[in-house]
Amino acid sequence: MLFAAAKSSGISGTLVVAMIALVLSASTLTWQIVQFLLGGARVSAELHFGAHDGGGVVHGPADKPLQWDRLTGQGYTERLLGVQVRNRGRLAVSVTAWSVVLDNGAAYSHGDWHINQKYPLPFRLEPGAEAVWFCPLEPVVAMGATFQKSNRPAGTVQAQAGLGTGRTVKSRNGLSVGALGR
């Protein structure tokens, strides 16, 4: 039927086959590009607030504040900042470093802290996996306050992770340095 319509309009059957082949090859090439782009590790970082009671950690995204009064009443007295790293890709990746960074370039990390022993660096992050590293909130607040008085004031704080590929990912969510101490 396609060839009959082509003949009646003056288009040869060879041209119709060539056009079909062109469309199929273009769609195959597009699919291969999509597979290549989605085939590697797709890593994201997110800044978390948390609290520690000496045994466990309660945490959540920094843009959804925790109720500090309730947590303190339940024994979670030490406030934390966390860096959650998630791999949504199809290949594993190594996380080689993590830090809480200010937008002026200053960074804080506390890698050998006892809470972080579950995820020693470098940490192999498998497809679909996530890991969270924590640091005490007070040193980051002090660092932010120090830079507020300098010629390089900091405006926001974000989570950052260094990968074995040499790439660095930063969180999309961030907080103003002034909001950290509250």
Image (spheres, rainbow, N blue to C red):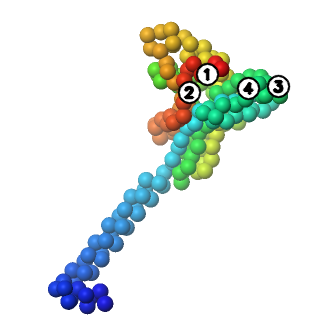
Q: Are marks 2 and 4 in contact (CB under 8 Å)?
A: no
What residue is at 74 percent from the left and 22 percent from the top? 78
User: Circle 1 sits in a helix, a strand or a loop, which is it?
Assistant: helix
Left or right: residue 161 compared with residue 6? right
What residue is at 57 percent from the left and 19 percent from the top? 178
The alpha-carbon separation of the residues under discs 3 and 1 comes to 20 Å
Q: Position of residue 70 (x, y in %)?
A: 78, 28
Q: Are marks 3 and 2 in contact (CB under 8 Å)?
A: no
Query: Mark 4: which amino acid?
Result: Trp
Image disc number at residue 68:
4
Query: Mark 2: which amino acid?
Result: Leu
Q: Which residue is mark 3?
A: 73
Q: Which residue is mark 2?
A: 175
Q: Are marks 4 and 3 in contact (CB under 8 Å)?
A: no
Q: Are marks 1 and 2 in contact (CB under 8 Å)?
A: yes
Q: Quadrant of residue 94?
A: top right
The alpha-carbon separation of the residues under discs 2 and 4 comes to 17 Å
Q: Earlier in the sequence, mark 2 or mark 4?
A: 4
User: Circle 3 sits in a helix, a strand or a loop, which is it?
Assistant: helix
Up/down of 125 relative to 24, above or below: above
Query: Mark 1: which amino acid?
Result: Leu
